[in-house]
Amino acid sequence: MQQPSPGTPGPPGSPAARTPSTRRAAPRAMPAGEGAAHHARLDARAGDVECMVGLSSGRFTVANAPLWLGLAAVLTILAGVLLAVLGSDSELLKMMNRCWTNWAVLFFTFWCLGILYAKWVKTSIQMRALRAVDIVPRRGDFVLSPGTAGDVLQRIRAAAERPKDFMLFRRIDLALSNLGNIGEVRDVGAVFESQADSDASAIDSSYTVIRALIWTIPILGFIGTVVGLSQAIGSFTDVLNQTGSDAASIKSKLAPVVGGLATAFETTLVALLAAVTIQLLSTWVFKREEALLDGVSDYTTEHVLSRLKLTDWQ
C-alpha cells in the first residue's frame, strides 16, 4: 500500500488527515527581564536639565546648586535689562532701584526657584520606577530567594539604563546582591531601613540652601527697611532745619522723607512676598519627595520582603 507523501493529506479519517503537515511551535518561556524590555527603558538622565547641559546630576533628587546659582545671576541681569528697556519711568524699576536689597532678594528668589524646579523634575523621574512593571514577578507561586534573586536583578537591568540612578532599583539591588550572605528576612528589612534612612537624610540635607535663603531673604528686607528709615530721618532733619515757611520749599524737603519711607516699606514687602512664595513651594516639593520615599518603602515591603524566603539557605 502506498504511503502518502509528507504534506499530502491521507484518506478521510486517517491519522495523516487529522494531523496538519505544519505544526504550530510551542510557545517558549520568556526569559527573566524580557517582559520589561518590551517597554521603553527608564533613564534617570532623560529630562534632567542638569544632565542635558552636560553637568553631573546630584544623587536622586538632589539639585546641582552651583548651576542654578549661575542661572539665577543671568536671570537677574536679564530682569534688570528688561526693566530698563521698559523705561526709567517704570514704577517697578523705581521700586527695585530704591535699595540694593530688592535686587539681592530677586537673585536669591531665582536661585531657590531653580533648585525647587530641578528637585520637582528629578522627583517625577524617580517616581517612574514605581510604575515599572514586572520587576518582581506577580505570580502567586513565585518565591524570592537567593536562587531567584538573579532573575529580579536581570529584570531591573532590563528596565533601566542605569538602575543605580533610581532610588528604588538601587535599594533592591543592594539588598538582593548580598542575599546569599544574609541569614534572616529581618536582616533584609534592616538593609532596607538603613537605605531608607540614608535617602531621607540626603533629601533633608538637600534643602540646606533653601532653608538658609528663606531666612536670609526677610533679613534683607529688614536691612532695606533700616536703610529707608535712615534716609527718611536724615531728610526729615533738613525739614526741621528749614527756616522759611514757604510751602513749596517744605514740600520739596519732604519728598526725600516720603521716598525713604517708601523704601522702608517696599523692601520689606518684596522680601516677605518672596519668602512666603519660596516657603510654600518648598513645602510642596518636599511633600512630593516624602511621597517618593514612602512609595519606595511600600514597594520594597510589598514586592520584596513579603515574597522573600531564606529558610532553605540558612
Image (cartoon, grey):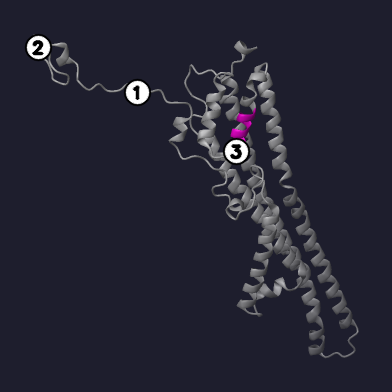
Name the quarter where the N terminus is drawn: top left
Say which amino acid is labelled 3: Phe
Q: Nearer the viewer, residue 203 or 284?
A: 203
Residue highlighted by disc 1 = 27
Q: Position of residue 128 (x, y in %)?
A: 53, 39
* N-term mark: 1 or 2: 2
Gap between marks 2 and 3 measured at Cα: 68 Å
Q: Which residue is mark 3?
A: 166
Taking the view exactly as shown, the residue that stands out farthest to the front is 2
Secondary structure, mark 2, is loop
Quadrant in the rendering for residue 79: bottom right
Separation of marks 3 and 1 at Cα, in angstroms: 34 Å
**Which segment is the magenta one?**
163-174
First in residue order: circle 3 vs circle 1: 1
Q: Check the image and report above or below for 115 versus 133.
A: below
Residue under the image location 13 percent in, 18 percent down? 9
